[in-house]
């Protein structure tokens, strides 16, 4: 995720990283070359200006704008929901660790196991969302870590191990059923957050919508020179480039942020969030490494 100061224009206006420039440059350049070719034909071979096409563009333009607005709004809602879900994972892990330190103090082995599993959970969740195999790096309990890696869904396996440790800790520490239910409710919340993240990750925007929007963009930009040739001549290519850059950029922003759990420059910083959870949990007790 790109960090920036919104008050400093120079840090955003001249930025290349995270700006979609690399992705849309070739598309915009291709449309510009096509516009140059049409301009050359118009000036040296035969006129290509089509009477009335400007009116058609004027009618289609607002509809295309609405499609693009809907695309980016829908994608941003997915991005923001993903951030809220990871915020819930942060808070739930903190609450689970806090309660484990307090209520499982009489069962230190179970307490430490819960803390280690809590630290492992966000890393395993990030691996699941990114389609990667999660591997223990000796920061977590060997038995729980190996069990989680051996299963197809490490985050769910860790949640199951957390419930098992809490149940065993209930007996060893003499917790009431109410306290156990309170602790296990946090595990339940973690599983719900993972499921909601997977819903975003595995459900892209409808295919028909994406196809229609991209076809409309190409037709609009491809026919735009026919509107401008009679007035702007060779400057038509420059105008077409900037229009294509703006429209293709808006569409590509929607593509980049619709699944916020990957490695794109505008995706959520899952590693930093996971490391923050680990630091918070480790700080609760000096007995943790």
Image: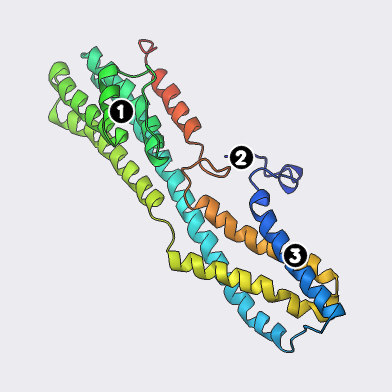
Taking the image as shown, residue 288 lies to the left or right of residue 78, namely: left
**Is residue 152 shown above or below 19?**
above
Quadrant (top left, top right, bottom left, bottom right) of the C terminus: top left
Alpha carbon distance from label 1 to label 3: 51 Å
Alpha carbon distance from label 2 to label 3: 30 Å
Q: Which one is in front in this view, the residue at disc 2 or the one at disc 3?
A: 3
Q: Residue at point 25% right, 19% down?
A: 143
Element type where label 3 sits in the image: helix
Element type where label 2 sits in the image: loop
The answer to which of 52 and 92 lies nearer the viewer is 52
Dot 3 crowding, Cα within 10 Å, few <14, some 14–19, many 20+: many
What residue would you read off at disc 3?
32
Quadrant (top left, top right, bottom left, bottom right) of the N terminus: top right
Element type where label 1 sits in the image: helix
Taking the image as shown, residue 25 lies to the left or right of residue 135, namely: right
Q: Earlier along the polypeptide chain: callout 1 or callout 2?
A: 2
**Is residue 59 shown above or below 182?**
below
Q: Which one is in front in this view, the residue at disc 1 or the one at disc 3?
A: 3
The image's mark for residue 271 is: none
| Residue 213, x across and y down, in percent | 54, 68
What residue would you read off at disc 2?
2
Q: Earlier along the polypeptide chain: callout 2 or callout 3?
A: 2
Q: Residue at point 51% right, 37% down?
A: 269
């Amino acid at each position: 995720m790109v960090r920036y100061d919104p008050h400093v224009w120079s840090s955003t206006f001249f930025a290349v990283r995270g700006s979609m420039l690399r992705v849309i440059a070739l598309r915009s350049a291709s449309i510009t070359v096509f516009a140059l070719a049409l301009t050359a034909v118009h000036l040296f071979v035969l006129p290509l200006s089509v009477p009335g096409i400007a009116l058609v563009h004027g009618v289609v333009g607002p509809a295309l704008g609405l499609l693009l607005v809907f695309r980016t709004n829908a994608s941003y809602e997915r991005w923001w929901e993903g951030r809220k879900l990871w915020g819930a994972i942060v808070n739930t892990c903190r609450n689970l660790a806090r309660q484990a330190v307090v209520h499982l103090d009489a069962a230190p082995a179970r307490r430490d196991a819960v803390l280690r599993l809590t630290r492992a959970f966000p890393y395993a969740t990030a691996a699941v969302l990114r389609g990667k195999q999660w591997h223990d790096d000796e920061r977590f309990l060997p038995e729980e870590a190996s069990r989680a890696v051996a299963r197809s869904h490490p985050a769910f396996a860790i949640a199951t191990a957390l419930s098992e440790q809490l149940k065993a800790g209930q007996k060893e520490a003499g917790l009431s059923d109410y306290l156990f239910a309170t602790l296990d409710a946090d595990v339940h919340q973690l599983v719900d957050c993972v499921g909601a993240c997977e819903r975003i990750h595995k459900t892209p925007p409808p295919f028909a919508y994406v196809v229609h929007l991209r076809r409309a963009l190409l037709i609009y930009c491809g026919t735009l020179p026919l509107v401008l040739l009679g007035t702007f001549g060779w400057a038509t290519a420059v105008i077409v480039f900037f229009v294509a850059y703006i429209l293709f950029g808006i569409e590509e922003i929607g593509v980049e942020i619709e699944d916020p759990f990957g490695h794109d420059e505008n995706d959520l910083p899952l590693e930093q969030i996971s490391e923050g959870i680990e630091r918070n949990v480790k700080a609760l007790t000096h007995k943790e490494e």
